[in-house]
Image (spheres, grey):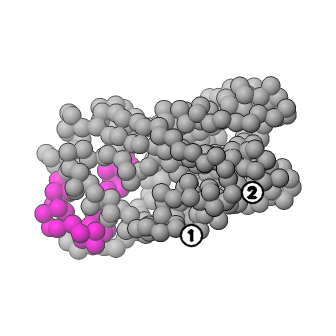
Amino acid sequence: MTDTGAGPDTRGYLDYLLTNRNFSAPAVAAAIAAIELNVPNRPLRVLDAGTGAGGALPELIAAVRGRSGHGGTVVAVDAAARAVEAAGRRLDDLDLDGVTADLRVGDLRDVVAEATAAGDRFDLIWSSDVIWPATFDDPAAVVQALAEALVPGGTLALFTSNYYQSMFLPGHSRLERLIRTASELTWRLPGDGPTHYERLGAWMRAAGLVEVTIGVHPIAAPVSDPAARAFLEQTVWPEMRHAVSSNGRAAGMSETDIARAGELLDPDSSAWVGNDPDGYVVQPALLWTGRSTIG
């Protein structure tokens, strides 16, 4: 078997949105609860930039309702119509009392440009696993645009599940590092430099934000946990298997490594990681926040 050189397999995109939403929910809730807002004497305006399946909408709506006596608006935008549809279904289960939810299909850059031009800026902009080089060629420029769309004293909150620092194959750390490199090659991610996906804080500082801080909101669960199991089986392990077939050798994997990865990631194999009763997953999610001083 030779490397196919294929790019990411996005056929399971909606499954990813839903399983990731359910698995990361505790970290998202903790992260939003930790955000300190300057609450004005008027309705709050919040942007969910890249809402996905609406995983942050319950907490963002609750924040608008609970932290302001004036209610407000949560604008949620995503480039994928199927994501916005999933987010819309999420809204059906939420209490919107005092809060307007505005769901849009579109480019978040267009939304913030329009808001900035109209002087209709946001008190909080939240973005989760969106601002990175797999989505934008120049993620720093996107962060700059988001910063310019904040009111003075407004907060930009960039959340990342920290996928490439997670533990998905505990007990096989060397092999997992190689598979991670194969995945980075498959997604054509830079190995380092100014557009590397871990540069969120640097992009915020470059955008002129102050009080730039980082917080960690880890998730740990056994593979028997239903949300973790669904996330691993439907999203993570298939992605890793695809990465091995696409760029395993390019990542430095030997024939033995590739064969072992195949055994561990194949549900029909007796060595499948899903059969390990002591298996677990750890995801060290991060929240970067910064405050605007732009008038």
In depth, the one of 215 and 91 nearer the eye is 215
Residue occupied by mark 2: 148
Image: 231 above or below 251:
above
Q: Residue at x 64, y 46 (%)?
A: 211
**Callout 1 crowding tier (Cα within 10 Å): few <14, some 14–19, many ≥20:** few
On the image, the x and y values in percent for residue 136 come to 57, 65
Height in image: 180 above or below 215?
Answer: below
Q: Position of residue 6 (x, y in %)?
A: 37, 71
Left/right of residue 113 with respect to residue 89 in the rendered view: right
Three-letter residue code for mark 2: Glu
Q: Residue at x 53, y 32 (%)?
A: 30
Is 256 included in the stretch rendered in magenta? yes
**Disc marking residue 137:** 1
Nearest to the observer: residue 213 or residue 138: 213
SS under mark 2: helix
Residues rendered magenta in the picture: 234-263
- What residue sits 70% from the left and 55% below the top? 147
Earlier residue among tags 1 and 2? 1
CA gap, disc 1 and disc 2: 19 Å
Can the viewer see residue 287?
Answer: yes
Query: Which amino acid does the dot numbered 1 rest on?
Result: Asp
Q: Is residue 51 visible?
A: no
